[in-house]
């Protein structure tokens, strides 16, 4: 589409504007005020910076069908941009996922959804591995992470690492040098280590409260962990799995108030079970993944004592954020503007002149009406 006008209640950085937004050749030209009080909401395209799959597909399956199938499912729930997220795995499997991402980026319909890769691991604490397969965990050695960076050749947008591991500080500095978002996660680090990591380029916390240390007591003394560090270091950004399961609504509301919408992103952390019915499923690839099951709107490890990722979609995140007390403007900001800034996506995340034409259109109940990515309609109800 060479030129397109959308009319409705437009969610801009200055607030909600009744009017029209014009885009041309995939770029926003501007916003014009007008009479659209009963129109749909037009938001910046939703951005999911932590997502493993959906619709029966996982990005670790390593096929174009899996990448595009997951993208299709999440587009129908409001996502315009996503970062395919890996799990700890053999290097060969990781390198293959880079090749698949390169191929799907050229897909005519869904290619513009794929921004870059989020590596979740393999540099994690065994104590906080959670659903990550422990046999692939390791420390960040320079030769190893440089080989990954070389194979990725610019495809990595963020990397989640446990900062207490030997070599992690050097990796953080390297990622900062490359403009890659260095995030801390699946970690048993205490406050002093988190402080040091922040000075080495780690600016973000992966799925806040999940897979990370909290206040620890040793010989009577108390030591703040990573959770407390998220509040104590003002400029650290966080992300929450806003499915209402990983954190209750009361705690979500507390995080929103304490960090603010500028420092908190909403993520699905969705696995292949998103959009599927309850029952058995697999976390990770079909060949090397782990069996788990979906129950009560969340994925659980066998035995039900731990979660195996969420089955949430972007529209559900926004609804839950508002249930937890966020305004519609802040809920949208936390799934568009804030994640874009966290991951250095300078071309999207806001409805302002010169930004990419990414829009998520929804009604009063956050039912998705249409999604535009790079000026192309990728979903329409």
Image: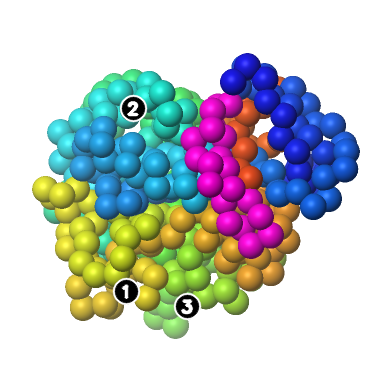
Front one among 361 and 215: 361
Measured as percent of width and height from the top left, residue 287 is found at: 11, 48
Q: Secondary structure at mark 2?
A: helix
* Magenta segment main secondary structure: strand
Q: Which mark is residue 295?
A: 1
Residue at the front extreme?
A: 381
* Quadrant of the frame with the N terminus: top right
Asked whether, in this view, residue 63 is left or right of residue 164, the answer is left
Disc with the residue nearer the chain's start (2 vs 1): 2
Range covered by the magenta-colored residues: 362-381
Disc with the residue nearer the chain's start (2 vs 3): 2
Residue visible at 32% across and 51% down in the picture = 55
The answer to whether residue 378 is magenta is yes
Q: Which residue is mark 2?
A: 104
Front one among 12 and 136: 12
Measured as percent of width and height from the top left, residue 26 is found at: 60, 22
Residue visible at 17% across and 37% down in the picture = 93
Asked whether, in this view, residue 60 is left or right of residue 193, the answer is left
């Amino acid at each position: 589409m060479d030129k397109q006008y959308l009319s409705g209640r437009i969610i801009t950085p200055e607030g909600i504007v009744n009017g029209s937004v014009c885009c041309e050749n995939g770029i926003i030209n501007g916003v014009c005020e007008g009479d659209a009080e009963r129109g749909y909401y037009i938001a910046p395209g939703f951005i999911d910076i932590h997502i493993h799959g959906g619709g029966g597909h996982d990005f670790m399956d390593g096929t174009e069908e899996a990448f595009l199938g997951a993208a299709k499912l999440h587009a129908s729930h409001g996502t315009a941009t996503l970062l395919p997220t890996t799990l700890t795995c053999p290097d060969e499997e990781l390198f293959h996922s880079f090749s698949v991402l390169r191929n799907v980026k050229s897909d005519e319909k869904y290619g513009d959804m794929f921004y870059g890769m989020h590596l979740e691991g393999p540099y994690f604490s065994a104590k906080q591995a959670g659903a990550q397969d422990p046999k692939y965990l390791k420390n960040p050695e320079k030769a190893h992470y440089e080989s990954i960076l070389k194979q990725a050749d610019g495809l990595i947008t963020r990397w989640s690492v446990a900062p207490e591991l030997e070599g992690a500080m050097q990796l953080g500095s390297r990622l900062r040098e490359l403009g890659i978002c260095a995030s801390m996660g699946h970690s048993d680090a205490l406050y002093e280590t988190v402080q040091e990591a922040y000075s080495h380029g780690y600016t973000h916390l992966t799925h806040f409260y999940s897979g990370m240390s909290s206040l620890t007591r040793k010989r009577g003394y108390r030591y703040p962990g990573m959770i407390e560090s998220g509040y104590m270091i003002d400029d650290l950004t966080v992300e929450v799995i806003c499915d209402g399961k990983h954190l209750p609504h009361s705690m979500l509301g507390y995080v929103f108030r304490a960090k603010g919408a500028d420092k908190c992103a909403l993520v699905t952390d969705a696995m292949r079970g998103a959009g599927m019915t309850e029952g058995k499923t697999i976390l990770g690839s079909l060949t090397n993944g782990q069996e788990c099951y979906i129950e009560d709107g969340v994925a659980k490890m066998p035995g039900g004592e731990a979660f195996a990722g969420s089955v949430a979609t972007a529209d559900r995140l926004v609804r839950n954020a508002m249930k937890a007390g966020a305004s519609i403007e802040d809920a949208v900001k936390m799934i568009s503007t804030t994640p874009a800034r966290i991951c250095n996506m300078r071309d999207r995340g806001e409805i302002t002149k010169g930004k990419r034409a990414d829009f998520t259109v929804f009604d009063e109940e956050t039912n998705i009406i249409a999604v535009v990515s790079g000026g192309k309609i990728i979903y329409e109800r």
